[in-house]
Image (cartoon, helix red, strand yellow):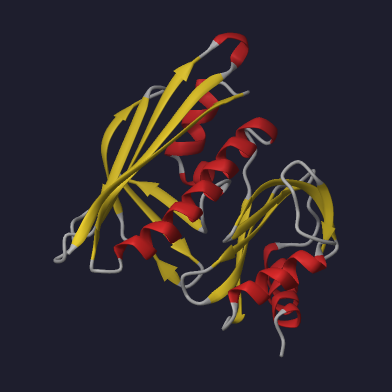
Amino acid sequence: MGHDFELPQEATVGATPEEVWEAISTGPGMDSWFLGRTEVAEGVVRTAFGPFDMPPSTVTAAEPLQRLAHSSDKGDDGRFVAYEFMIEGRERGSTLVRMVTSGFLPGDDWEDEFEYMSRGLELYFATLVEYLGHFAGRTATPVTEFGPPIADWAEAWARLHAAAGGVPRVGERIAVAGVEGVVYHRSSQALGIRSGDAMYRFVQGFGGSMVASHLLFEGEGEGEAEQGVRWRAWLEDLHAG
């Protein structure tokens, strides 16, 4: 058993095609909105999310300022994930960005995996849109830290929402964990907050832990190591007991 899937997403952003291309086709660009750290070299996209190495993805089409596609190899069980980005310049320096994620998920539990994947892709695309609208041309340092194992996700999210002063709404300005910003994304499995020099993301991780998957731009203050220690300790305190 298994299932083919396709998830299209699109948005018009206040960035040029050149800025969009930089964001989707280079390692520093992808570091600034995707997950973890990414390297693009010799036609292969490699991403590390904390201690996890994602399957390498081979570039299958590259038409600068127009279209980029890359795909993982098919596994023995048929599993693969492919990404396609299409770019159309619009008037007044804006650009239409379309991202289509497709592939095959094996197993009888493919629906649960697709739900989890879909929520993650919604967060990452929303982050791409936010990045292009507010930080285009800047490079982020990704900080990825895992909290303790979570047994009750409803309780885990309730604790995070309580720390933010209640269930956040998109567009609302909130303060949580000593940072203040605007909520740009919220779902049952993720929360994204944009400040002046960072995007802070809390994600229901596939390893069974809540993950701080933050993006820090120049001027944010503490370095990557210090931020990592801080956020790991904060997650442990939040979910202790």
Percent position (x, y) of residue 2? 21, 61
Q: Nearer the viewer, residue 106 or 142?
A: 106
Tag count = 0
User: In which image quadrant can residue 99 be found?
Assistant: top left
Q: Residue at x 58, y 18 (%)?
A: 94
Can you say whether 240 is above or below 128 in the image? below
Q: Residue furthest bottom?
A: 241
Left/right of residue 180 with respect to residue 108 in the rendered view: right
User: In which image quadrant can residue 223 be found?
Assistant: bottom right
Left/right of residue 145 with respect to residue 170 in the rendered view: left
Quadrant position of the N terminus in the picture: bottom left
Can you say whether 77 is above or below 130 in the image? below
Q: Residue at x 37, y 57 (%)?
A: 114
Left/right of residue 241 with respect to residue 99 in the rendered view: right
Q: Residue at x 23, y 55 (%)?
A: 3
Percent position (x, y) of residue 202? 64, 62
Left/right of residue 179 with respect to residue 62 in the rendered view: right
Q: Nearer the viewer, residue 199 or 56?
A: 199
